[in-house]
Image (cartoon, rainbow, N blue to C red):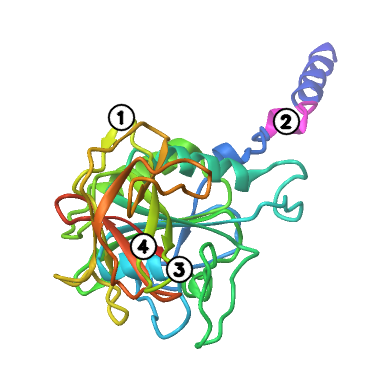
Amino acid sequence: MYLALILGCLLVFAGCGSDESQAPVEPAQSPETSTAVSAPADGNTEVGAGQAETTDDIPFKLNTHQPVPPNFEEAYGRRARIVVQFYKLDEDSLSYPQGLSVDRQVNASMERLSTQYPDIEFFSYEIEDPGPVGEDESLQPGQYGTLAAQLGVGMTPFVAMLAPSGDEYVITNLFEGYVPRPVLSQALFDLAAVEVEDNTSDANVTLDQVQTTDKGGGIEFFTVTNHDPKARNLEGFSLRVLDPESAEVTPGAPGVTVDSDIMVKPDQSVSIGRVPDIVDDEGKRVAGTFEGGTSLDLAPGDQIALLDPGGAVASTIVV
């Protein structure tokens, strides 16, 4: 009898374990540690499913018959390595817990990482500002037209990394939702390693403004910002008007050339003028001069490229 009682107690104790002891519950994953969802390899990108990361290259062909940003089209035509990002400034409580500004976090990561890869073209667009989509309408700087639709943007933040492959482009990495900075860094490192024959300068400078003359469509002054971690000499840099059909730099195209020794410190902006006594929009005297540019006959919508002394494209802008 005592033996039966002891065996009964042992059975009771064995069955009294909690659910946690029987089947441990794994803690919920935060966005920082969430596993990427693979996109299908048939070229049809799934969107809107939280974080998504491609595992295979996805073919992509830009439809230039629809409105797309001119500088993006130019980089695409030049077969450069490209990173394009779409973000939303307002928090979206439907996608993430209220107060978690994932778009701002990813955008800040991309801005910091972009300075490390001057041979990659970076484009960033606020999703709320597509601009006009009519065929006869011109997009303003920052507007993306039909680019988001062509890339299949579903939710933000959205980051697509593109590289030329054969006669077309492929999306080497695509992210939707929160992405940790180390993941973006590795993807950019892989993209930079892709062998291409593009004409992208390693000078990390941007052409921020081109002010035309009152008459003749010449250039009064233009402004350049240096994003390199070291000072950059702009002597020998030039501006060239891009071909309106191909958006490429045509050999012998009209332009201007910096003929002054102009050192630009990191994160500094300077203006280069037609003559030494010109004052730019910030009330500062130009840092130096250029030669040429008096008979360019520029018109609104023309696209201009900033070339380094070797002729590689450092930046583009629409007048």
Residue 278 counted in the magenta span: no
Location of mark 4 (residue): 219
**Label pair 3/1, CB-CB below 8 angstroms:** no
Which quarter of the figure is the C terminus placed in?
bottom left
Magenta highlight range: 15-23
Nearest the eye: 180 or 266? 266
Work out whether mark 1 precedes mark 2 in sequence or the reverse, and give the earlier one: 2
Q: Quadrant of residue 303?
A: bottom left
Work out whether mark 4 precedes mark 1 in sequence or the reverse, and give the earlier one: 4
Residue 18 counted in the magenta span: yes
**Label pair 2/4, CB-CB below 8 angstroms:** no
Location of mark 1 (residue): 230
* In the rendered image, the vertical position of residue 78 relative to residue 31, given as above or below: below
Work out whether mark 3 precedes mark 2 in sequence or the reverse, and give the earlier one: 2
Q: Quadrant of residue 229?
A: top left
**Which residue: 47% across, 40% down?**
284
Work out whether mark 4 precedes mark 3 in sequence or the reverse, and give the earlier one: 3
Work out whether mark 3 precedes mark 1 in sequence or the reverse, and give the earlier one: 3
**Which residue: 47% across, 42% down?**
111
Nearest the eye: 254 or 196? 254
Note whether residue 295 is visible.
yes
Residue kind at label 2, given as amino acid type: Glu
Question: Is label 3 or label 2 in front?
Answer: 3
Residue kind at label 3, given as amino acid type: Asp
How much space separates mark 3 and mark 1, taking CA atoms? 36 Å
Location of mark 2 (residue): 20
Location of mark 3 (residue): 214
How much space separates mark 4 and mark 3, taking CA atoms? 9 Å
Q: Residue furthest top?
A: 2
